[in-house]
Amino acid sequence: MTITASDASAIDHVRARAAEILALDRWPRERLLELQRSRLRSVLQHAVDQSPYYRETLGADAADRDLSELPTLPKQIVTERFDQLVTDPRVQLDSVRRFLETASRVRSSSASSGCSRRRARPGRQGCRCTPEPSLRNGLLRAWRVSRGSASGPTRV
């Protein structure tokens, strides 16, 4: 397996984050709770700033309120108001549906072609290996098509 520069960068990022997370293990409880509150405030402020739904539902002071005072989000609202919920205007329900449909077709066509590295054991069917590069590239292609940028496949 060849590791690309972007893979190496991702691995370095994961290692750095792991070190940060492990360092938190030595923090006193109160400091951890304050970090949680701070991060929650940041997430809530981002939601209010970027999402029309959250701005309307939670109000401008959401980041300063106690979590128990905030309303829950029922699945029905997510499906009915998805486009107003998301905080990135490039993500729209239609493009998510197109991606899922395309990815499903790519996955089922790849699965039907079989894996070149069968490792079936008695009582088991198929292979437990990672998806073939063609499947990963197909999923990447499906994502690009769903976003309207269907340039050639990029190897993963």
Image: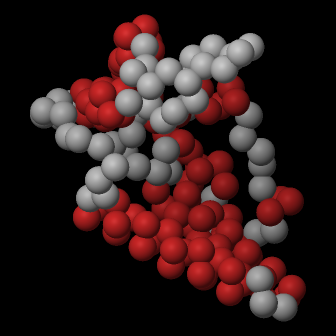
The residue at the point 71 percent across, 84 percent down is 24
Residue toward you, 136 or 44? 136
Residue 45 percent across, percent down from the top left: 57, 67
Rendered view: 152 above or below 51? above
Residue toward you, 137 or 54? 137
Q: Residue furthest left?
A: 151
Q: Quadrant of the C terminus?
A: top left
Rendered view: 156 above or below 42? above
Residue 143 percent across, percent down from the top left: 32, 32
Position of 140 with respect to 154 (left or right) is right
Residue 25 percent across, percent down from the top left: 77, 83
Figure colour scheme: secondary structure
The residue at the point 37 percent across, 45 percent down is 89
Instruction: Work out whether residue 123 can be spotted.
Output: yes
The residue at the point 30 percent across, 28 percent down is 134
Position of 2 with respect to 35 (left or right) is left
Instruction: Work out whether residue 80 can be spotted.
Output: no
Q: Identify the image quadrant of residue 121.
A: top right
Rendered view: 27 above or below 102? below
The residue at the point 68 percent across, 26 percent down is 76
Residue 56 percent across, percent down from the top left: 59, 49
**Tag count in the figure?**
0
Q: Residue furthest front?
A: 122
Q: Identify the image quadrant of residue 144.
A: top left
Residue toward you, 151 or 154? 154
